Structures are given as structure tokens and as C-alpha cells.
Image (spheres, helix red, strand yellow):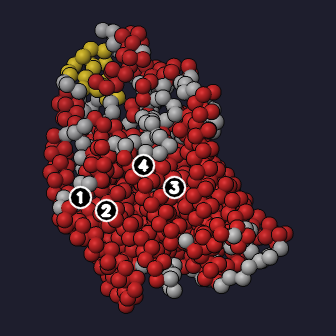
């Protein structure tokens, strides 16, 4: 017998069911993950293959693969949606009236369920951060020094958000102007932070920068990176080469300008995504400021280097672009314009794959799932055959996009080298990175912030599943919000794989920015779904956005403090000036010009070889990869084969000599016989050898 309930009672019952299913799913997934971790750890212990030891040039202690931790992540990602889907489908068929007293208690205790939900989230946050690296915690609290001021500002900001929710619609125009002004000021501040005319003093910063500039300069100089595909980051150097040739510039300053523009565009795309999808514009502004602080400022202050973030565009530019495009797509009502935007999304995805394979595939999958979800909703009442016929192009489009990207790579490689792509070597770096990882640290199941990020994505998945199971009862806003959730969750989980390879806390901040955008959607959704008739119940609904505002308002205020009060540009301007005048790169440049004849050919084999070639107005024509891209003994063999025939003056740094001595000591001693080279000059970093061959 089916009981009769009012619509409001059904809503309450549905919320209780969803809460029970979600909590139960989390526990079931946790049990499953523990079992998987145990199984993997017991039967497949960590190992490094003999081939790997023989060919890789980094120290072994940095490369201990964490198989069971990677298995834990993938188990969470793939098992939660399935478990939640089937449990929810089963629970929705149950009638609480059939449970008697227990059912009546559940129906009347939604306020208790909400309190438990809030307690669970708070406890999970504390547990996940309690053993967090203390230095990482310090990075989070570098902005506002005055706790009383922060507490006052938090209450003020939270009250402003709640006031806007109630009465602030008339203030939209003023708030929009304020947002534009803040955005312009932030872009100016970031552009000054990111732009640099020189490298840092530290070898680490030089190596970070070189890993991106070196392949770009190789391509610009007429060399290629497409035969062996031994650069991890993709074919982005060909994009830079076109810009270099268009503007007839190839300096490190211009490279810095390009990356600065890309970073600023990424910030604009995030602002567009929040503005177009969040109804409460003050919430959008608060979360945007938090984004800028967490993903653009923390790394600068924590590493004390403006150059670390120079490679951020390679990971996030196209991802933020596709988020903005999806937001525009949802706001467009014209069918032909929507089709045009859909095609543009696949073109952007193709370019993203060429730019950087890993993040490009994330862009493609996120965009494809976004469109497929929207089309599936529109075809909800259509027969199955018609659904398949209409959805078939959207199923084929991702594969055609990958094929188009591959054809472009093949044609590009053949045009530049006269050879087709070497399939055996094509994904050497990717296989190395994702099977073993670099600098991989332990990732506990809980007691680490990565678990919070995963739970946020799980909640987003749950909301999407709820929407799929109740298409008939969802309005357009709910469908659009779910479409954004699924896109953000898929992109976020795809980016998280990069963190698994380089698992330290600052990288977690960089790759988890989709989680912050999801939280902005949650806060906005909670505010607009406030129950109208249940006064006491509404008070508990306020707890969710109010508690969420606690950390987010801190990050927002820290952003304003850094940009408008602390003014980091002043201190970094001094660093840039000193670096340009006396940094490692400038020291090496002066030493080379003082001890070599400018008319002679010079072989520069150093960490900063590409910058030095650029400063000396010489093209990098060495027929092997740059030092930063050495990955196996074959690279060292190419160096010795080249140097045995070369007639040029040789410049090497201490880092390169130590590597050659460590891995090819006999060949190095044979090369530097008296009849081949004599030492002309040296300092604490560089050695210059006169060629006698």
C-alpha cells in the first residue's frame, strides 16, 4: 500500500534517502578501498624494473612507485558512482511507512540528519588536515596576520553574502562594476608577478624554467622534438614557435610575456565560469578571490620565487577555457549557436591534446561528457532508437578528435624531420611518469587533504546521479548545474592523476581548483534551495554555506590583503632586478663572452643552455635533447657521438659533468684526453674547453 504525502514531505523524504545513501556509499567505498590496498600491497609489492634502473638518470630513492595508493584513488573514483547509483535506485523504491516507528523517526528527524551531515563534513576536514605537513599549513596562513581583524571580516563577509541572498538583487550592477575593477587590478598584479626578464638565483628555478623554454628554443632554432617524443609536456613548443616568428622575438623576456598572458587569460576564464553559473554574485566574487589566492599566489610566497608558476599555463589554460566555453553554451538558447559552440569545443580539445597530451585528454573527456549529458536530458522522452541515432555523432566525436590530433602530430613530425613518429618511443615519458612517478610521497586514505578533494568530487557525482534518476522532476537550472558538476568532477579527477606523480602539497593546490568551483556551486545551491515553511529546519540549512564560508572567506581576504596591502610586486621587483644583473644565467653569460671568441662555434651543454644561446644570439643546433630532458643512457650516447666529431669550443656546467661522470665515466675520460680538449677557463659553475680535434 502506497502512503499519501504532500510534495514537501516527499522532498524531505528524498533528502533523507539521499543523505543515508551517500553516507552508506562512503563507508562501503572506504571498506572496498582498504581491501584493494591490502590486496595490492600483499600480492604486488612496490618494485622498480631492471630496465628502469638501467635507463633512468634520477636517483632511485625518489622513484618508489606506490601501486596500492594509486589503486586506492582509482577504486574511489570508479566505484563510488556505481555503488551510489544502485543504492539510491534501491532506496527510492522503499517507502518509509513500511518501516513503522523507524520510518516515522527518519521522516521527522531531517534536522538531525543535517546536523550529522555537517558534523561528518567538519570531522572529515579535521581528520584530513590533522597530520598535514606543518610547512603546508604555514603556506595557507601567510596573508592576514591579524586574527581579530580576520574574525570580524569573516562575519562581515558572511553577513554580506546572506544579505545579498535576501535583498541584494538590486545591487547587481554595482557589484558587477566592483568585480570588474577587482579583476583588472588582480590581472595587473599577477602580470607583474609572472613577468620576468631573467632567471632565479637557484639551480632548481633555472631547471624548472629551462624544462619549458629549452624545447621551445630547440624548435625555434630548427631542431625538432617530434621523432622520439621524449619531452613530457607535449607539442606546445610549436605553438610558441609560431608566436616567436610572428613577432620576430625569441628572448626569455618574450617567453615570459606569452606565459603571463596565458595565466591572465586562465584567470579570466575562471571568473567567467563563476559569474555565468553562480546566481549569488557575491558568492561568485568571494570564491574567485579564493581561487586567485590558492592557485596563483600561495606558490609564489611559499617558494619565494616568481618563476615556479611560469609553467602553470601548460596544465590549466585549456581546461579553464573549456569551462568558460561550457558556461557560455549553457547560457545560449539559439540551436545553431549551440552547435557551433559544440564544434568549437572539439576543436579546442584537439588543440589541447597537441599542446599537452595529458591535460588535453582531460579537456576532451570533460567536454564530451558535458555535451552527452545535456543531449541525454533533451532526449529523455524519445524512443531508444532515436536516442542512439541522435547521440551517435556525440559518441564518435571524441574518437575523431583524437584521430585528428594524431594526424596533425604525424604530419607535423614528417614535415619537420622527414620521418614518421616512432611508436615505440612515442609515450616513453608518459609511461615512466604514470607507472612510477616523480618525487612520489605517501598518500594515506585519510589524514591527508587529498581525501577532502575526492569527497567533493564524489558529492558532485552524487548530485549528477540524483538528477539522472529524476529527470522528469528537474528544471533547466538543475540540469545545467549538474552538467557543470559532471564536467568539473571529471576534469578534477583527471588533473588529480598529475598530483599522484608529483605528490606534494603545493601541486595538490594547483590541480584541485575544479573542487573550489564545485564548492561555489554547492554554496549557491544551498542558499537558493532554502526551505520556505520550515523555520527551524532553515536554520540548519544555513549551517552549510556559513561553515563553507569560514575557510573560503579567509582565502578571499588573504587575496585582497596580498594584492592591495602587502604588495608582493615590490619585493619581487627587487629580486628580478638583482637576478637580471647578477643571477646565475647572467654570470654564465658574462663568463662565456669573456673567455670565448664570438666568431667561433660554441657547444653549450648546461642546464641553462637555451637561455645562453638566446642571449648570445646563437641558435641551439645541438643534435640531442637539452640537459633537462635527459631520460636514459641513449641521450648520453648521443652527446658523446656528437662531441667526438664536433670542432667547436665546449662549455659545460658542473651539473652536466657530474651526470656524465656518474653514468658514463669511461667515455667521459676518453673524450677529455689531451688530444681532444684542453681546459681553457673555469669558475664555480662553468668549464670552458678548447677543442683541439
User: Are the two marked residues, 3 and 2, in contact with CB atoms closer than 8 angstroms?
Assistant: no
Q: Position of residue 218 (x, y in %)?
A: 42, 40
Sooner in the amino-acid sequence: mark 2 or mark 4: 4
User: Are the two marked residues, 2 and 1, in contact with CB atoms closer than 8 angstroms?
Assistant: yes
Left or right of 446? Residue 463 is: right
Sooner in the amino-acid sequence: mark 1 or mark 3: 1
Which marked residue is nearer to the observer: mark 1 or mark 3? Answer: 3
Can see residue 169?
Answer: yes
The residue at 60%/49% (across/down) is: 29
Sooner in the amino-acid sequence: mark 3 or mark 2: 3
Sooner in the amino-acid sequence: mark 1 or mark 4: 4
Which marked residue is nearer to the observer: mark 2 or mark 4? Answer: 4
Q: Give above or below for 429 relative to 478.
A: above
**Secondary element at image label 1:** loop
Give the image quarter of residue 331.
Answer: bottom right
Residue to which mark 1 is pinned:
143
User: Label 1, label 3: how many angstroms apart (C-alpha)?
Assistant: 27 Å
| Residue furthest bottom in the image | 170
Residue to which mark 3 is pinned:
455
Q: Residues within 10 Å of mark 4 (few under 14, many from 20)?
A: some
Q: Nearer the viewer, residue 286 or 227?
A: 286
Residue to which mark 2 is pinned:
555
User: Are the two marked residues, 2 and 4, in contact with CB atoms closer than 8 angstroms?
Assistant: no
User: Label 1, label 4: how many angstroms apart (C-alpha)?
Assistant: 22 Å
Sooner in the amino-acid sequence: mark 3 or mark 4: 4
Numbered label attached to residue 128: 4
Q: Residues within 10 Å of mark 2 (few under 14, many from 20)?
A: many
User: Label 3, label 2: how many angstroms apart (C-alpha)?
Assistant: 21 Å
Which marked residue is nearer to the observer: mark 3 or mark 2? Answer: 3
Amino acid at each position: 500500500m502506497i502512503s499519501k504525502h504532500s510534495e514537501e514531505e516527499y522532498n524531505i523524504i528524498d533528502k533523507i534517502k539521499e543523505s543515508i545513501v551517500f553516507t552508506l556509499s562512503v563507508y562501503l567505498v572506504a571498506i572496498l578501498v582498504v581491501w584493494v590496498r591490502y590486496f595490492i600491497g600483499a600480492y604486488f609489492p612496490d618494485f622498480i624494473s631492471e630496465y628502469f634502473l638501467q635507463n633512468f638518470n634520477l636517483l632511485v630513492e625518489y622513484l618508489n612507485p606506490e601501486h596500492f595508493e594509486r589503486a586506492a584513488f582509482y577504486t574511489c573514483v570508479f566505484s563510488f558512482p556505481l555503488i551510489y547509483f544502485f543504492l539510491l535506485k534501491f532506496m527510492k523504491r522503499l517507502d518509509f511507512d513500511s518501516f513503522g516507528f523507524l520510518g516515522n523517526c527518519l521522516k521527522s528527524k531531517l534536522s538531525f540528519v543535517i546536523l550529522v551531515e555537517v558534523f561528518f563534513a567538519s570531522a572529515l576536514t579535521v581528520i584530513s588536515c590533522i597530520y598535514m605537513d606543518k610547512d603546508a599549513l604555514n603556506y595557507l596562513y601567510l596573508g592576514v596576520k591579524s586574527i581579530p581583524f580576520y574574525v570580524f571580516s569573516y562575519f562581515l563577509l558572511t553577513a554580506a553574502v546572506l544579505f545579498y541572498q535576501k535583498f541584494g538583487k538590486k545591487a547587481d550592477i554595482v557589484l558587477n562594476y566592483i568585480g570588474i575593477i577587482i579583476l583588472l587590478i588582480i590581472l595587473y598584479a599577477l602580470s607583474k608577478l609572472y613577468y620576468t626578464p631573467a632567471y632565479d638565483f637557484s639551480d632548481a628555478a633555472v631547471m624548472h624554467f629551462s624544462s619549458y623554454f629549452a624545447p621551445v628554443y630547440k624548435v625555434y632554432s630548427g631542431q625538432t622534438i617530434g621523432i622520439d617524443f621524449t619531452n613530457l609536456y607535449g607539442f606546445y613548443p610549436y605553438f610558441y614557435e609560431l608566436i616567436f616568428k610572428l613577432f620576430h622575438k625569441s628572448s626569455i623576456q618574450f617567453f615570459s610575456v606569452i606565459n603571463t598572458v596565458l595565466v591572465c587569460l586562465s584567470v579570466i576564464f575562471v571568473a567567467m565560469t563563476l559569474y555565468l553559473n553562480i546566481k549569488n554574485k557575491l558568492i561568485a566574487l568571494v570564491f574567485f578571490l579564493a581561487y586567485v589566492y590558492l592557485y596563483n599566489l600561495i606558490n609564489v610566497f611559499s617558494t619565494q620565487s616568481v618563476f615556479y608558476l611560469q609553467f602553470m599555463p601548460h596544465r590549466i589554460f585549456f581546461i579553464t577555457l573549456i569551462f568558460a566555453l561550457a558556461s557560455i553554451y549553457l547560457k545560449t538558447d539559439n540551436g545553431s549557436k549551440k552547435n557551433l559552440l559544440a564544434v568549437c569545443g572539439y576543436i579546442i580539445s584537439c588543440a589541447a591534446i597537441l599542446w599537452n597530451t595529458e591535460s588535453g585528454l582531460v579537456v576532451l573527456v570533460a567536454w564530451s561528457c558535458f555535451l552527452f549529458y545535456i543531449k541525454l536530458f533533451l532526449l529523455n522522452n524519445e524512443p531508444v532508437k532515436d536516442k542512439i541515432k541522435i547521440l551517435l555523432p556525440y559518441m564518435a566525436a571524441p574518437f575523431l578528435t583524437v584521430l585528428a590530433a594524431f594526424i596533425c602530430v604525424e604530419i607535423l613530425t614528417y614535415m619537420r624531420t622527414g620521418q614518421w613518429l616512432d611508436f615505440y618511443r612515442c609515450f616513453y615519458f608518459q609511461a615512466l611518469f604514470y607507472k612510477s612517478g616523480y618525487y612520489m610521497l605517501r598518500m594515506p586514505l585519510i589524514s591527508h587533504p587529498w581525501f577532502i578533494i575526492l569527497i567533493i568530487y564524489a558529492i558532485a557525482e552524487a548530485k549528477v546521479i540524483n538528477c539522472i534518476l529524476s529527470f522528469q522532476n528537474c528544471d533547466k537550472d538543475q540540469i545545467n548545474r549538474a552538467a557543470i558538476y559532471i564536467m568539473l568532477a571529471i576534469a578534477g579527477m583527471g588533473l588529480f592523476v598529475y598530483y599522484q606523480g608529483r605528490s606534494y602539497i603545493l601541486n595538490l593546490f594547483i590541480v584541485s581548483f575544479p573542487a573550489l568551483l564545485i564548492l561555489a556551486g554547492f554554496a549557491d545551491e544551498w542558499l537558493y534551495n532554502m526551505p520556505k515553511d520550515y523555520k527551524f529546519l532553515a536554520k540548519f540549512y544555513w549551517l552549510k554555506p556559513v561553515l563553507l564560508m569560514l575557510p573560503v572567506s579567509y582565502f578571499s581576504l588573504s587575496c585582497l590583503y596580498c594584492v592591495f596591502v602587502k604588495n608582493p610586486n615590490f619585493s619581487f621587483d627587487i629580486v628580478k632586478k638583482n637576478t637580471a644583473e647578477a643571477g646565475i644565467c647572467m654570470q654564465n653569460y658574462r663568463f662565456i663572452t669573456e673567455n670565448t671568441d664570438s666568431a667561433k662555434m660554441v657547444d653549450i651543454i648546461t642546464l641553462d643552455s637555451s637561455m645562453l644561446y638566446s642571449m648570445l644570439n646563437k641558435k641551439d643546433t645541438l643534435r640531442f635533447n637539452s640537459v633537462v630532458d635527459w631520460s636514459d643512457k641513449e641521450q648520453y650516447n648521443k652527446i658523446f657521438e656528437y662531441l667526438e666529431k664536433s670542432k667547436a669550443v665546449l662549455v659545460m656546467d658542473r651539473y652536466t659533468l657530474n651526470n656524465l661522470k656518474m653514468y658514463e665515466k669511461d667515455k667521459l675520460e676518453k673524450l677529455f684526453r689531451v688530444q681532444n680538449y684542453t681546459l681553457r677557463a673555469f669558475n664555480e659553475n662553468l668549464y670552458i674547453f678548447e677543442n683541439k680535434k
